[in-house]
Structure formats: structure tokens, C-alpha cells
């Protein structure tokens, strides 16, 4: 299994902090989620980290066995 991790407000939207998913292309994995959640996860300001490394290009990402994909919401500072 692979794992999706939801941080901050995305955890609230998902209703849980993490979810086990079948490995495969990210697009296929997201297609199995609630459509409203998938739209939020693909938001322009949401960052993704694969196994602890921030991704700059999310196209073509394929989750393998044991991979962790974290969704990081935008943060505001001040």
C-alpha cells in the first residue's frame, strides 16, 4: 500500500490525517477520492511532498509500494 497524508485544513476536509491507497499513478489514486476533496488537493496553492521531498512538477507521479504522498495547504505568516 501507499499512503496519502493530509495536513492542516486539508485534514479537516478529508476527515482524517492519512489514508492507505493502492499504488499507481497519482491521477488514478485521486480519482478514487471524493470529488470535492480531489479538487481541493489539486488546488493551485497546495504543495505535494513525495517521501518527504517537495515536488515541483506533479505530472507523471506514480506511487509505489510504501510511498507517502503528503498534501500541504498554503500557509500564511506574519
Image (cartoon, rainbow, N blue to C red):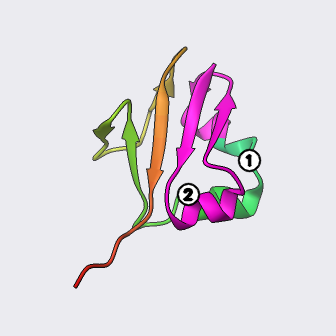
User: Which class describes the residues within 10 Å of circle 2: few (<14), some (14-19), or many (20+)?
Assistant: many
**Above or below, 19 relative to 14:** above
**Residue 58 at what x, y percent from top left?**
40, 43
| Pointer 1 with pointer 2, Cβ within 8 A | yes
Q: Relative to residue 58, is residue 25 depicted above or below?
A: above
Label number found at residue 33 = 1
**Residue at the limit of the structure toward the top, as seen here:** 65
Q: Nearer the viewer, residue 47 or 15?
A: 15
Closer-to-camera residue (36/7)? 7
User: In the rendered structure, does residue 16 fall within the stretch colored magenta?
Assistant: yes
Q: Earlier in the sequence, mark 1 or mark 2?
A: 1
Q: Which of these two is toward me, 68 or 45?
A: 68
Q: Residue furthest left?
A: 78
**Would you place residue 41 above or below residue 75 in this image?**
above
Q: Bounds of the magenta span?
A: 1-29
Q: Could you tell whether 51 is left or right of 1 in the image? A: left
Residue drawn at 61 percent across, 48 percent down: 17
Q: Is residue 17 magenta?
A: yes
Residue where numbered disc 2 is placed: 41
- In which image quadrant can residue 18 be found? top right
Amino acid at each position: 500500500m501507499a499512503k496519502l497524508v493530509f495536513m492542516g485544513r486539508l485534514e479537516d476536509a478529508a476527515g482524517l490525517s492519512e489514508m492507505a491507497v493502492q499504488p499507481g499513478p497519482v491521477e488514478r489514486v485521486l480519482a478514487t477520492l471524493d470529488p470535492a476533496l480531489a479538487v481541493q488537493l489539486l488546488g493551485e496553492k497546495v504543495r505535494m511532498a513525495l517521501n518527504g521531498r517537495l515536488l515541483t512538477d506533479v505530472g507523471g507521479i506514480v506511487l509505489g509500494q510504501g510511498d507517502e504522498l503528503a498534501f500541504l495547504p498554503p500557509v500564511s505568516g506574519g
